[in-house]
Image (cartoon, rainbow, N blue to C red):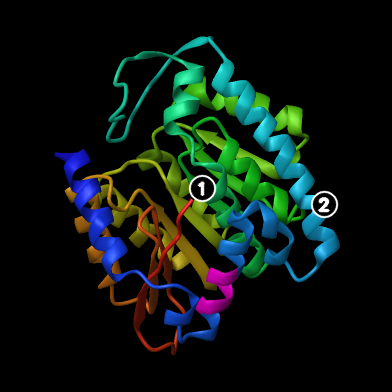
């Protein structure tokens, strides 16, 4: 059912999605332009106004991708504790790290989009719900080293893998992980806000995503962004995404099929954009 839902949703998305010319909000236009530039390797430095800094960060991204490659090749087997909606690829409790890396990590182009979005947002800490193997976390920490990334993960074995990744990349001093059920640990991290950016990539159930969003809103920077991953993963997740679009405090939203971006910018006319983000 979910694979069918994803395919039909993708075709519907393609039928209505526009590009930068479809965006009449200068704020959203700038964010989308930067994100798409970062996603394309041959335009990698166009996502940041400081070309020298962008070049330096792009070098860090190569190191992160080397870690992804190492993880994908790993045959180490770990015990998985999945407190969310589970995997559609492999629901086994004992899984190879390489299999998790191949099926569960956010693709490089989407990591670069998130990094560019984070760089364009105000200074401040980042909150990530769902660490997995730490690759997305590393990207988020790479663009503004002075800011902190708080990341929450429910599985001790995957978090241990992530911490090893950050150590090899020299990023562990900028990343603050919390282990445990996010339902229990989220409240302890929220006082670290206001957060410039929040990434929801944990419990892929509409009820949980909506609950997390309500809890995070009071701790979101006025110009900040909440990113919801896998918005067309299941019919339930899509229903949750639709509910977030209608939320009274959401003023702007961007639907990129893989992800949704939400903004609660006061005094902003309510508007939404369905945009292409291929590759």
The majority secondary structure of the magenta stretch comes to helix
Residue 262 in the magenta stretch? The answer is no
- Mark 2 lies on a secondary structure that is helix
- Mark 1 lies on a secondary structure that is strand
The structure residue drawn at horizontal position 45% and vertical position 40%, both measured from the top left corner, is 130
Decide: is 275 above or below 75.
below
Decide: is 153 above or below 195.
above
Q: Position of residue 49 (x, y in %)?
A: 76, 71
Q: On residue 56, which mark appears?
A: 2
Q: Say if residue 73 shows up in the picture.
A: yes
- Contact check, label 1 and label 2, Cβ < 8 Å: no
Residue 63: quarter of image: top right
Q: Say if residue 154 shows up in the picture.
A: no
Q: On residue 45, which mark appears?
A: none
Q: Position of residue 12 (x, y in %)?
A: 23, 61
Horizontal placement of 103 versus 59: left or right?
Answer: left
The structure residue drawn at horizontal position 66% and vertical position 63%, both measured from the top left corner, is 119
Decide: is 86 above or below 93.
below
Residue 264: quarter of image: bottom left
Looking at the image, the residue that sits furthest to the left is 1
The structure residue drawn at horizontal position 49% and vertical position 39%, both measured from the top left corner, is 152
> Of callouts 1 and 2, which one flags the residue occurring earlier in the amino acid sequence?
2
Instruction: Judge the density around disc 1: few (<14), some (14-19), many (≥20) Cα neighbours within 10 Å.
Output: many
Looking at the image, the residue that sits furthest to the right is 52
- Residue numbers of the magenta segment: 28-33
Q: Position of residue 219 (x, y in %)?
A: 49, 64
Residue labelled with disc 1: 128
The structure residue drawn at horizontal position 25% and vertical position 57%, both measured from the top left corner, is 11
């Amino acid at each position: 059912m979910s694979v069918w839902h994803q395919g039909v949703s993708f075709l519907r998305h393609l039928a209505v999605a526009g590009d930068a010319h479809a965006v009449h909000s200068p704020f959203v236009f700038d964010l989308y332009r930067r994100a798409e530039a970062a996603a394309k390797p041959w335009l990698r430095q166009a996502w940041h106004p400081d070309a020298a800094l962008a070049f330096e960060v792009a070098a860090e991204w190569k190191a992160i991708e080397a870690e992804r490659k190492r993880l994908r090749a790993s045959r180490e087997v770990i015990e998985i504790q999945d407190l969310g909606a589970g995997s559609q690829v492999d629901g086994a409790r004992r899984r190879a790290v390489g299999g998790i890396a191949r099926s569960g990590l956010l693709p490089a182009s989407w990591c670069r989009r998130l990094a560019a979005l984070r760089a364009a947002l105000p200074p401040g800490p980042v909150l990530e719900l769902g660490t997995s193997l730490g690759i997305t976390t590393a990207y988020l920490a790479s663009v503004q080293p002075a800011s902190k990334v708080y990341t929450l993960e429910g599985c001790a074995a995957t978090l241990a893998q992530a911490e090893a990744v950050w150590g090899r990349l020299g990023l562990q001093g900028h990343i603050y992980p919390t282990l445990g059920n996010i339902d229990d640990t989220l409240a302890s991290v929220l006082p670290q806000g206001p957060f410039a950016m929040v990434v929801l990539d944990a419990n892929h159930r509409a009820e949980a995503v909506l609950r997390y969003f309500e809890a995070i809103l009071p701790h979101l920077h006025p110009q900040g962004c909440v990113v919801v991953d896998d918005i067309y993963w299941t019919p339930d997740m899509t229903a949750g995404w639709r509910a977030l679009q209608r939320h009274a405090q959401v003023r702007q939203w961007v639907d990129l099929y893989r992800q949704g971006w939400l903004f609660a910018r006061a005094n902003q006319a309510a508007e939404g954009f369905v945009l292409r983000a291929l590759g």
